[in-house]
Amino acid sequence: METQQLPEDRDSAPSPVDDEGTEAPSRSFGVPRVSGFVRSRGFRELVGLIALCLLVLVLLNRFVVQPFTIPSGSMEDALSVGDRVLVNKLSYDFGGAPQRGDVVVFDGRGSFVDTGTTDSDTSGDDFVKRVIGVGGDTVKCCDAHGRITVDGVELDESSYLYPGAAPSSFPFDVQVPAGELFVLGDNRAVSADSRAHLGDPGGGFVPVSRVIGRAEWVIAPLGHGRSLDRPQVFAALDRAIASAGGGARGHQG
């Protein structure tokens, strides 16, 4: 009877033999364990990297820049509803202070919030407005041309005031205390700003110590990205006040 030869097992490779004739271990011996170690190490490194990134973001948000969302139109056209802005929290450190024309975000407790009124452009206790007067300034509205004056110098607000909006719907005449700010929204008709708090205990003035930082960049939504530059008219105002003997009070603490 013929015998049928079994087919050769092509998947089975002979074990390597060393010089002494002893069967050597397979080259694949231990590879799964090394591969698992590499995967575990890589996962730990990824988790560590994510944790480091989160820590950096927290520190940046706490000490350097902080995002805020604008929920109302009181700062139009500079800031629109839904704009996401980045506030530079270091802008007034190292001896600096808010200047006339800066758009600032501040904690309204003790100046705006304690009155019991609610402003439409707040996020909790935070407000965003433009600085019009700094400590020592006399801010009035309105002169013969219907404009605000700072220390008797007329302020041309046409470059940032909301189209068609008047500088103010009612007159005021205030002296800004040292270390405080007089702030207004660009869209005066819908802005509950320093004017709305003139009769309150704080007089509508914002302590410089309550300023969180200067709003410097619009980062969202898509297509709205831009820097919030200080209008050039305020540099001219500073020069006119300085030449009249008022000095550069925007740099006091």
Image (cartoon, rainbow, N blue to C red):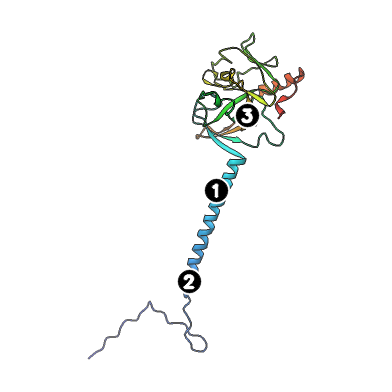
Is 111 placed above or below 45 here? above
Q: Secondary structure at mark 1?
A: helix
Q: Distance of mark 3 from mark 1, alpha carbons?
A: 30 Å
Is 27 placed above or below 148 here? below
Q: Secondary structure at mark 3?
A: loop
Q: Is residue 181 left or right of residue 121?
A: right
Q: Nearer the viewer, mark 3 or mark 1?
A: 1
Q: Is residue 180 left or right of residue 122?
A: right
Foreground residue among 218 and 106: 106
| Amino acid type shown at disc 1 | Leu
Which residue: 68% across, 36% down?
93
The residue wearing badge 1 is: 54
Which residue: 30% across, 83% down?
6
The disc, 2 or 3, on the residue closer to the chain's N-terminal end is 2
- Is the N terminus in the top left, top right, bottom left or bottom right quadrant? bottom left
The residue wearing badge 2 is: 31
The disc, 2 or 1, on the residue closer to the chain's N-terminal end is 2
Is 114 placed above or below 15 here? above
Q: Distance of mark 2 from mark 3, alpha carbons?
A: 61 Å
The residue wearing badge 3 is: 229
Q: Distance of mark 2 from mark 1, alpha carbons?
A: 35 Å
Residue 35 locus on image (x, y percent): 48, 67
The crowding category of the residue bearing disc 3, from other C-alpha atoms within 10 Å (few below 14, some 14 to 19, many at least 20), is few
- Determine whether label 2 and label 1 are within 8 Å by CB: no
Residue 91 locus on image (x, y percent): 66, 35
| Amino acid type shown at disc 2 | Val
Foreground residue among 125 and 223: 125
Which residue: 26% across, 88% down?
3
| Amino acid type shown at disc 3 | Asp
